[in-house]
């Protein structure tokens, strides 16, 4: 059991402090009594997240066998084993063993890949604070965070992690880093005043939330919610409720499995009925033999290698993507990326670097622009309008940045080529700007030794430091930074060049107008100022707020968490590929709209807020997601609603994010993508893919890889199914037309097959292996990222593919039966060979048909000769299959096992000539298809 957020229907952030304390039955100074705390712990339970009931490993392993196609293969293996028991035509049931080995390998690979799939709630638990400082019976004590109860008074200071949700009752310059929960890129200043209207998480300035950390100051709060009732707990609950999404590939292969299951039954029934009708079959034994033959042929129609080849190709794709810094956690997610038509991206840390960057410095004589993004102190510094920076602008902006650098507690560090800031991100950005301007930390430190600090507070909105001046030892200097309107009110002069001039009312208004203009550009602004302090007037004991009077205004500094350098190009590439980027963030609407416009996501700067979404009915939301591409100040429920609305409209959604607040939407989306560097453990565990370099451009590259993989899956499906259909039709029409083509039993009675069951099995094992797998390694088709994503409901095998598959099957059947007829006496074409010779010729022809067909299968439209030499693996697979077949034809013990005879050079030439027809005839149909597509201006698809 967990505690309610409060006993009042009005949320704590909208109540005065005394009302919250009364509702929770506690005292701000003394806290709860230890007796009452124990009572509440029994009543509400421990302050921890409810763990998910673990799924046993054996059940996870058995889940790998639930796929329709896998079930079909298991049935095929059992039937094959039954046939072996009945006929005993070999030492072991080799076909059944081979099929079961493929199924088992597929299950093991899937089990290993998904072993860590459900650890999101565990990661949430690890984020919780281990210990917390509380006030009980009027005394401070440190207790395990799990023992905190509603009504406890907790103390929090810089570096602490909040152990529960709480309403602040005292705050001294407290700032909380809430990016992981709300998406807010900057630490949030906290106060104690009640908030009148209903607001989202990011705007509840008098609340602290479990799992967030204090980046500055200190505070005291009364606990309002623990365990699963905290905002973190609500997210954990949403994660448990979010269903595991079935990927498009899984759905498509499921449909193929069902279609094959129906086809197998139809083939068995039709084959049995045809033989019983056409042939003179008498007696139970003969009828049973026909039944066994029909079932065996149906089993041969199942492409045994399909699940293993799909798994292997996806696994190889995982390895390729890992080299591109995209780590795949679920195999099927590789392909799902290729079908994504919406990327719903978080802003902070995804499209941006989550590193504040100074963009502009405005002084009395003009403004300066700063290039570069993030904390790396690299970037061009130019005046607004271009050209060179001259005086007095240079001296003004250098003085402004020197003041900002010294009135600062952050530290800029470089480790292994990566720059980071220790401390407040805003202060870190000021240091980076100073370095870009050529100001060195050692030189500034040597001249300006700090001797005092008047710290920032949310009430004053200012921070000042006092320094000795090594170059002017007769004075000390006070440096101040803070909210421009507040700071300007404490300034009497403005620095113009090297002269401090009196601030007129007109100049004050002009500075505030510039401040408003910078805010319209979504820049966070700070003012900087200084004051000379004569040593004979100000002693060390006088350094308080009095030094923040009669200041000299130095300028305005505008900063933002800017887009990544490569993000704009990645957004453009995504749009070119028919993918719609959407921004979903917890940040301010103005900031979100400006960043989105800069990236090309939305030019109209329209942003829908979480408050708008909260009151929006589903039908209006469905219309909104079609038109709006920027959503701001959203909470986890809003993100989920947006993703679900997009899915209702038929979109395949890839959701990116890095915070705890993103986890439920990541799990619900068709594919969740988490950030590897800035991402929380929670987001990584809920996601299907993790970006090791946090680079939005990597997503677009991964989409291209996903499309290439799906294209290759279609290639080997085209190959496997056309080859298997060719085998089934050869057997079916061979029996049906046996008398016409001279296929008669040497003993004079019974049913004669054009190919033996062992020969069909051999062709399946050899051609369904190396060549099919090599097709999965085919290079990406040209122009793959210039096409729109495939429609969400499109089958993995399209009508055009089925047409090509059936055409190839007919050609194989006709060619194989023609060679069989020409090899046997009688029939349409007179031959002179024995039955065993004729079957060997048909066996070889069908084998060669499939090796030629592997080149056809690379596309339904492009010529087989396009990029013919680009895939060395394909040629290797074909050569291996050919060598294995030669061994079956000429090796004595294999001749006996497969009932083959040696063939001469003329026999091979005849088989090659007929088998190559599938290549030339398919080329003619592709030529017609390309001409028709050009007439209808259709894009060529793989």
Image (cartoon, rainbow, N blue to C red):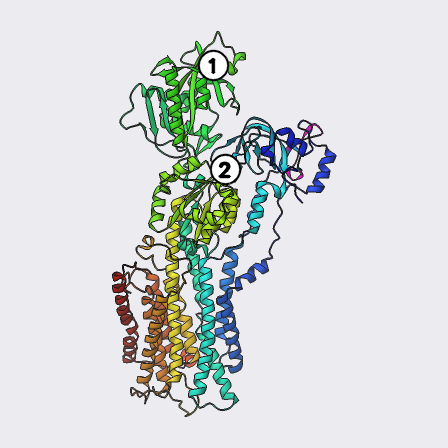
Q: Which residue is mark 1?
A: 549
Q: In the current view of this chain or complex, which residue is farthest to the right?
A: 35
**Measured Cα–Cα span from mark 2 to mark 1:** 35 Å
Does residue 689 appear anywhere in the picture?
no
Vertical order, 542 against 854 (above or below) = above
Q: Position of residue 720 (x, y in %)?
A: 39, 69
The residue lying at 39 percent from left, 90 percent from top is 746
Q: Which SS type dominates the magenta stretch?
A: strand
For mark 2, what is the residue? 179
Residue found at the very far top of the displayed protein: 536
* Residue 192 among magenta residues: no
Q: Earlier in the sequence, mark 2 or mark 1?
A: 2
Q: Secondary structure at mark 1?
A: loop
Residue 558 can be seen in this image: yes
Q: Which residues are magenta?
A: 133-147
Q: Position of residue 723 (x, y in %)?
A: 37, 72
Specify the farthest residue to the bottom.
748
């Amino acid at each position: 059991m967990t505690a309610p957020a409060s006993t009042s229907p009005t949320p704590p952030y909208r109540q005065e402090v005394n009302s919250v304390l009364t509702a929770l039955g506690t005292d701000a100074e003394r806290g709860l009594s230890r007796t009452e705390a124990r009572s509440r712990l029994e009543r509400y339970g421990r302050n921890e997240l409810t763990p998910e009931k673990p799924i046993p490993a054996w059940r996870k392993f058995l889940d790998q066998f639930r796929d329709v196609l896998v079930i079909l293969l298991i049935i095929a293996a059992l039937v094959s084993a039954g046939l072996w028991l009945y006929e005993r035509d070999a030492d072991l049931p080799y076909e059944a063993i081979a099929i079961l080995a493929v199924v088992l390998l597929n299950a093991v690979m899937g089990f290993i890949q998904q072993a860590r799939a459900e650890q999101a709630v565990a990661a949430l638990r690890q984020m919780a604070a281990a210990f917390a400082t509380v006030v009980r019976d009027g005394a401070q004590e440190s207790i395990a965070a799990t023992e905190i109860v509603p009504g406890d008074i907790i103390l929090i200071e810089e570096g602490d992690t909040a152990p529960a949700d709480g309403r602040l009752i005292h705050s001294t310059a407290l700032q909380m880093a809430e990016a992981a929960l709300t998406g807010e890129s900057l630490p949030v200043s906290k106060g104690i005043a009640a908030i009148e209207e209903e607001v989202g998480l990011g705007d509840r300035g008098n609340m602290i939330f479990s799992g967030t950390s204090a980046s500055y100051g200190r505070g005291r709060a009364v606990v309002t919610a623990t365990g699963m009732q905290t905002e973190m707990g609500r997210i954990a609950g949403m994660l448990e409720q979010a269903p595991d999404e079935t990927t498009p590939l899984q759905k498509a292969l499921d449909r193929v499995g069902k279609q094959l299951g129906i086809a197998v039954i139809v083939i068995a029934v039709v084959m049995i009925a045809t033989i019983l009708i056409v042939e003179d079959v008498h007696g139970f034994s003969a009828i049973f033999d026909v039944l066994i033959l029909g079932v065996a042929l149906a089993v041969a129609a199942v492409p045994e290698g399909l699940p293993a080849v799909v798994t292997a190709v996806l696994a190889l794709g995982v390895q390729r993507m890992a080299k591109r810094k995209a780590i795949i956690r679920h195999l099927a997610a590789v392909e799902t990326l290729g079908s994504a038509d919406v990327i719903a991206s978080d802003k902070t840390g995804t499209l941006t670097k989550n590193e504040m960057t100074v963009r502009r410095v405005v002084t009395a004589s003009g403004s300066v622009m700063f290039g570069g993004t993030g904390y790396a102190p690299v970037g061009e510094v130019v005046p607004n309008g271009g050209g060179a920076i001259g005086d007095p602008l240079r001296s003004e902006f250098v003085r402004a940045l020197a003041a900002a650098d010294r009135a600062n507690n952050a530290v800029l560090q470089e480790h292994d080529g990566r720059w980071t800031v220790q401390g407040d991100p805003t202060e870190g950005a000021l240091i980076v700007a100073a370095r870009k301007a050529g100001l060195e930390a050692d030189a500034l430190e040597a001249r300006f030794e700090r001797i005092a600090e008047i710290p920032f507070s949310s009430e004053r909105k200012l921070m000042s430091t006092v320094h000795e001046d090594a170059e002017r030892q007769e004075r000390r200097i006070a440096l101040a930074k803070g909210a421009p309107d507040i700071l300007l009110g404490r300034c009497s002069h403005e620095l113009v060049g090297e002269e401090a001039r009196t601030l007129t009312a007109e100049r004050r208004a002009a500075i505030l107008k510039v401040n408003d203009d910078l805010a319209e550009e979504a820049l966070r602004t700070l003012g900087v100022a200084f004051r000379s302090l004569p040593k004979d007037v100000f002693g060390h004991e006088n350094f308080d707020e009095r030094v923040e009077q009669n200041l000299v205004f130095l300028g305005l500094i505008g900063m933002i968490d800017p887009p990544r350098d490569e993000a704009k190009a990645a957004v453009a590439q995504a749009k070119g590929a028919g993918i719609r980027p959407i921004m979903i963030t917890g940040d301010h609407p103005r900031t979100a709209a400006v960043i989105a416009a800069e990236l090309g996501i939305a030019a109209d700067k329209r942003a829908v807020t979480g408050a708008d979404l909260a009151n929006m009915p589903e039908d209006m939301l469905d219309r909104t997601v079609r038109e709006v591409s920027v959503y701001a100040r959203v909470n986890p429920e809003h993100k989920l609603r947006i993703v679900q609305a997009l899915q209702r409209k038929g979109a395949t959604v890839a959701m990116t994010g890095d915070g705890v607040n993103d986890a439920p939407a990541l799990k619900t989306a068709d594919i969740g993508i988490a950030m590897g560097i800035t991402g929380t453990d929670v987001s990584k565990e809920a996601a299907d893919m993790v970006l090791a370099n946090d680079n939005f451009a990597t997503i677009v590259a991964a989409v291209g890889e996903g499309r290439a993989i799906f294209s290759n899956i279609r290639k080997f499906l085209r190959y496997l199914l056309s080859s298997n259909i060719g085998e089934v039709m050869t057997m079916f029409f061979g029996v049906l037309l046996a008398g016409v083509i001279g296929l008669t039993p040497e003993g004079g009675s019974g049913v004669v097959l054009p190919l033996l069951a062992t020969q069909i099995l051999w062709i399946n094992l050899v051609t369904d292996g190396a060549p099919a797998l090599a097709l999965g390694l085919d290079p990406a088709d040209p122009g793959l990222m210039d096409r729109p994503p495939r429609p969400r409901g499109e089958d993995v095998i399209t009508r055009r593919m089925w047409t090509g598959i059936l055409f190839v099957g007919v050609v194989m059947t006709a060619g194989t039966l023609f060679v069989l007829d020409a090899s046997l006496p009688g029939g349409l074409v007179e031959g002179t060979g024995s039955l065993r010779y004729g079957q060997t010729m048909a066996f070889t022809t069908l084998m060669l048909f499939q090796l030629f067909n592997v080149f056809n299968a690379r596309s339904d439209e492009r010529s087989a000769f396009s990029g013919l030499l680009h895939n060395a693996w394909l040629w290797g697979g074909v050569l291996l299959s050919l060598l294995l077949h030669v061994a079956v034809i000429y090796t004595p013990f294999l001749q006996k096992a497969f009932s083959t005879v040696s063939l001469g050079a003329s026999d091979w030439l005849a088989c090659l000539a007929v088998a190559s027809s599938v290549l030339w005839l398919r080329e003619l149909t592709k030529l017609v298809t390309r001409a028709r597509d050009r007439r209808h201006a259709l894009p060529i698809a793989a």
